[in-house]
Image: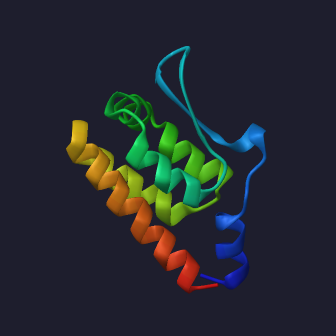
Amino acid sequence: MTPSSSTRILRELSRKNAFYFFSSVGNYTGHRAMSLEEFATKIREVETASLEFHLYRGDFEKWADEVLEDPELTRRISAVKLLEPTGNALRDQMDFTISKRLVELKSSQ
């Protein structure tokens, strides 16, 4: 990983590219993440129903891949999905996965 790619992944995003958390189609939770760091925080705050909704639709993977442009994070989120966690187990898995990636990216800057 080059410093420039980690800087790109960790950048502050526009409102258009932020991740917006929903609990179901059309039901916005009021939470959004405008960076990977903010996403890590929101994973610990939003209802687990929102995490389940987005994980199983592939929304987290799509955002990591297309917006953050982080194939490694995309792969790790896919691996979490294969475990089929729900509720707090899902929150814990996502928290661990995102936080670990965040530390790696920051240390490579």
Where residue 100 appears, as percent x and y from the top left, is 40, 70
User: From the viewer's perspective, is 48 left or right of 75?
Assistant: left
Q: Quadrant of residue 85?
A: top left
Give the residue at x 72% y 43%: 17
Q: Is residue 6 above or below residue 59?
A: below
Give the residue at x 41% y 30%: 50
Q: Quadrant of the N terminus?
A: bottom right
User: How many numbered marks appear?
Assistant: 0
What is the residue that sits farthest to the top in this orientation?
A: 26
User: From the viewer's perspective, is 81 left or right of 61?
Assistant: left
Where residue 49 appears, as percent x and y from the top left, is 34, 28
Give the residue at x 36% y 56%: 95
Q: Is residue 93 above or below residue 109?
A: above
User: From the viewer's perspective, is 40 left or right of 14?
Assistant: left
Q: Is residue 88 above or below residue 52?
A: below
Q: Quadrant of residue 23?
A: top left
Q: Is residue 81 visible?
A: yes
Where residue 106 appears, as percent x and y from the top left, is 57, 78
Where residue 43 appears, as percent x and y from the top left, is 43, 47
Give the residue at x 50% y 69%: 102
User: From the viewer's perspective, is 3 left or right of 75?
Assistant: right
Compare residues 70 and 34 and report the one nearer the observer: 34
